[in-house]
Amino acid sequence: MKQELNYGTDYKFIPVTSVGSGVGIEMLPDLFCHTIQIVNICLVGYPDDFVLIDAGMPKSANEIISVIEERFGPNSRPKAIILTHGHFDHVGGLIELVKHWEVPVYAHPLEMPFLTGQKSYPEPDPTVEGGLVAKMSTSFPNEPINLGSSVQTLPSDGTVPHMPGFRWIHTPGHSPGHVSLFRERDGALIAGDAFTTVKQEYMYKVFTQELEISGPPRYLTTDWEAAKQSVIKIEALKPEFAVTGHGLPMSGEVLTTSLKKLVNEFDQIAVPDYGKYVN
């Protein structure tokens, strides 16, 4: 099994960062997020019974292991790794982590071709409306990684392995099999890149982590109508806490009013004025 795991040939360290890099935030006693350069990972659960959501930027496995051992103790390992989707900045340390921990990975069935070496994602769009991050997106990896038999599909009944109380919700647009994770009892939402709380296309805003509601990262979003419907679906859940793939967590009234605004003004806030994936 270990021999068949590999990244695409374009896998490499991406030299971007933010003031939030290396910072962890506990949103709830069992919900912790940590920023790796410009992307967030989440830990859900308690010592001896937790999962890792997403796997950071390329070359980040050692940092992820350190974050987990600092929070839960030496030699701690998750029960599983749950992927919101398979873009490079969410699977960057994945193969090393799977080899280190020997734990299963779960993702939506529509992400499987991108996680088993079968199909590349559409190429990032450097021409899309935005700033320097959008323009440098041509250097971002888009070839599939191959997790072989280490990756499994999420249960069709909407439950999430080792995450009691959470259900996965199909929120496509940014990628075909993108999922968000929601817990009804306290309104906790792990949104992945269905929406963000930072203007991810602009280097200055990424670096400063200026908090503002935004759509999915434009340079990798290929289906804007699906992305809009996903945000509508999320807003209808009325989440109380949200951790997004990019940007600071958001909660309470700020989250409620921001999501309403994003739904009502999605075409103005999220959809770029131009780009090759804009209809």
Image (tube, rainbow, N blue to C red):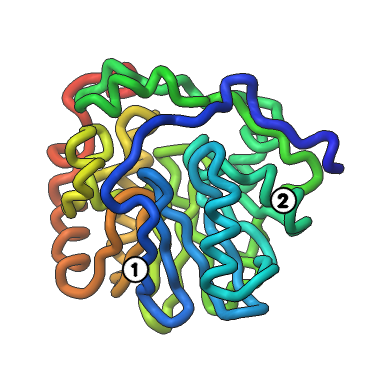
- The residue that appears at 56% across and 39% down in the rendered structure is 59
- The residue that appears at 22% across and 49% down in the rendered structure is 209
Decide if residue 37 is on the left or right side of residue 77: left
- The quadrant the C terminus occupies is top left
Disc 2 marks a residue whose amino acid type is Val
In front: 62, or 50?
Answer: 62
Residue 279 can be seen, yes or no: no
User: Residue 237: which numbered mark, if any?
Assistant: 1
- The quadrant the N terminus occupies is top right
Disc 1 marks a residue whose amino acid type is Leu
Q: Nearer the viewer, mark 1 or mark 2?
A: 2
Between marks 1 and 2, how big is the CA–CA gap? 32 Å
In front: 95, or 20?
Answer: 20
Within-10-Å neighbours for mark 1: few <14, some 14–19, many 20+: some
**For residue 133, what is the image quadrant?**
top left
* Residue 229 to residue 218: above or below: below
Decide if residue 179 is on the left or right side of residue 98: left
Q: Position of residue 116 (x, y in %)?
A: 71, 35
Q: Position of residue 266 (x, y in %)?
A: 19, 44
Residue under label 2:
98
